[in-house]
Amino acid sequence: MATIKDVARVAGVSIATVSRVVNKGPKVGQRTRDKVLSVMNELGYTPNANARALVTQKSTTIGLVIPDLSDPFFAALASGVDKIAKDSNVQLLISTSSMSAESEKQAIDLLVERRCEAIIIHSKLLAETTLIELSQRIPGLILIDRFIESINDRCVWLDNLEGGRIAARHFASLGHKQIACINSNYSIDDPKLRLEGFRLALVEQALKLENDMVSENEPSLKGGEIATQKLLASGKPFSALFAYNDAMAIGAISTLEDNGFKVPQDVSVIGFDDVILSRYSRPKLTTLHYPIEEMAQNAAKLALSFAANEQADVVRNYLPRLIKRESTA
Amino acid sequence: MATIKDVARVAGVSIATVSRVVNKGPKVGQRTRDKVLSVMNELGYTPNANARALVTQKSTTIGLVIPDLSDPFFAALASGVDKIAKDSNVQLLISTSSMSAESEKQAIDLLVERRCEAIIIHSKLLAETTLIELSQRIPGLILIDRFIESINDRCVWLDNLEGGRIAARHFASLGHKQIACINSNYSIDDPKLRLEGFRLALVEQALKLENDMVSENEPSLKGGEIATQKLLASGKPFSALFAYNDAMAIGAISTLEDNGFKVPQDVSVIGFDDVILSRYSRPKLTTLHYPIEEMAQNAAKLALSFAANEQADVVRNYLPRLIKRESTA
DNA sequence: AGGAAAAGGGTAAACGTTTACATTTTTAAA
DNA sequence: TTTAAAAATGTAAACGTTTACCCTTTTCCT
């Protein structure tokens, strides 16, 4: 592949001159510029970004660590980062990490080796201490969907607790008394917080969530089905169901209808996340909107600005918003 | 950030030695190795991938051009590439291209500048000649979801025509006579091919698709709804509907049920793609499985092998497969 | 003890750029 | 013309690695 030297030689100029025309710099005559341009074209010259990064100490790269690209939620996250990257003429390098602290650390290391300008990390498993230490070493590092008090200026997160509260209040306002919940059985904070907020607000409304009205399972369609079957099997009736996420909610609706319950006439169901699924389900899902793409955009802005030693003024703490569709009444 | 020189200086050895321990090379004694390792740790040394790429002429990067990361279909594609990348210790660099040949070209150029080992391109807009020329210049370039005869060994594609055929045969085998179709109005090959295959196989079965039984619109939920409304408005009855993709199919089901038609009792609907949506809809969607993730994996394998001057033996030409669920009868 | 082979370690060039600084050429005012 | 300023171009160092090649210790056999 042709290098700047080849172009210089063929065009009969110095590499400095070629560099100047490549970078649209000043100080180069029209005549030479045209000559160089035509040689570049003839030779199919493309500048080497690695060499450039080395000498300029800028990689024009933004790194992103997520567990799984195929999950629409993370795809939306990545898409948000990508949009800001595009605006800043920076490219998106993705590092996926599979379900272990070890692998999350590795994914980050790869991005550090690449000397990414900025790094956005979705980590649920890495220890707080590690993350804090990392954030000290890397100026452009931002955590998304995770809150760590001591480095809260580096975090962009959603208030899960409040999400639970909102769901509870919605059910209360609809007059529901017999309330159930299907939750994720993953050992991360989110399920605990959502449930806690849900409980708290229920109490405020003089309602309560019986212990056996909470069923845990995988946060997936199948998990939602199984969790709902268990709830049904217990025999206790309920008219309102709070699901950990949209996938579980849709699984729940499916199981409920298979068992003769109409949604929302017999049971109201509320989801969480507002992923694309929720608009495609029938009935359309009432859910809590998780503005992940916007959050990712802000995280990217923040990361880029921290990397440049500034501090962008963007929202970091998000509240989920209730989207009323057809699954609650 | 500490460099190899810093480590060498502090450890009292040459940079060659440090390089050897970093790369787990031979020819370094236990004693020195330990010393270097501890200094590396103390200084928080991380090798610079750009410098490495420069000298080794290997970027350990695989590039991917797609139009939109937030679309689950492309997210699945990216995920497939990522899996192979991981296996090959290579990182995924994503370049999104928005709806124009120009922008597709730019996205590719960015990856070339990065000297990606291999490049996977999902391009519907770039001219064949450009793509052919590009594939000549770049050994590790593979086209996904596009077929160009003269460089067919660089293509991984799905047989859209056959997809249409399969749908038609399925309807015929179910005894349907009054058949309709909602198609995408995008001016790319896929909609034309699917429809053509559908028509062709219908004729073989002595059936036919009336011209006014084809309605075009955007390939989205909303587009599916509108296209179906138009079909309904025409007044002609139909009992089988072939949708361009799952989103349109789900939109169609929604509109059909809103108009008092039961799916599949009154109308059978078949989708295309088998994206995650189709499993979450009610009734679950009968559709043509588009094995995009597997295709992407093979594209990545192929790209990497071409880049290494070999030629992996993988399937390049895929057939969609009928997934019978609940929306046809 | 002598010596050869093996092991450990160092030197310096190369990768493809950018850029401060130096040099040459052109322009235009005197 | 001369000449000072401006414009164009060139020189060379630097970025952080890897690696071929060379030199110095060890090791271990006879």
Image: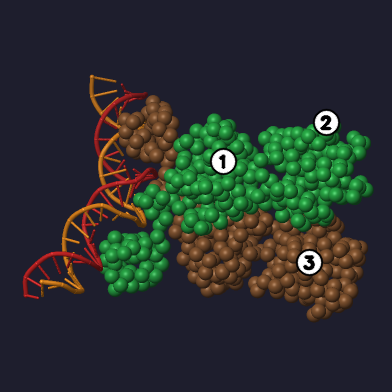
Chain colours: A green, B brown, C orange, D red
Q: Given the image, on which type of amino acid does mark 2 rest?
A: Asn
Q: Secondary structure at mark 1?
A: strand
Disc sitting over residue A155 in the figure: 1
Q: Chain of mark 3?
A: B
Q: Earlier in the sequence, mark 2 or mark 1?
A: 1
Q: Which residue is mark 2?
A: A211
Q: In the rendered structure, the residue with mark 1 lies on which chain?
A: A
Chain that bears disc 2: A
As drawn, the label of residue B225 is: 3
Q: At 49% from the left edge and 70% from the top edge, which residue is drawn?
A: B133
Q: Are marks 1 and 3 on the same chain?
A: no
Residue B253 locus on image (x, y percent): 83, 63
Give the number of the mark in front: 1 or 3: 1
Disc 3 to disc 2, how far (Cα)? 43 Å
Quadrant containing the N terminus of chain B is top left
Residue A81 image position (x, y, % from top left)? 56, 52
Q: Assign the C terminus of chain B to one quadrant of the image.
A: bottom right
Q: In terms of depth relative to the viewer, which is nearer, B164 or A235?
A: A235
**Label 2 vs label 1: CA separation?**
33 Å
Kindly identify the residue that appears in the image at 79 percent across and 33 percent down: A203
Q: Position of residue D3 (x, y in %)?
A: 9, 67
A310 vs B274, nearest the viewer: A310
Asked if badge 3 and badge 2 are on a common chain, one would say no
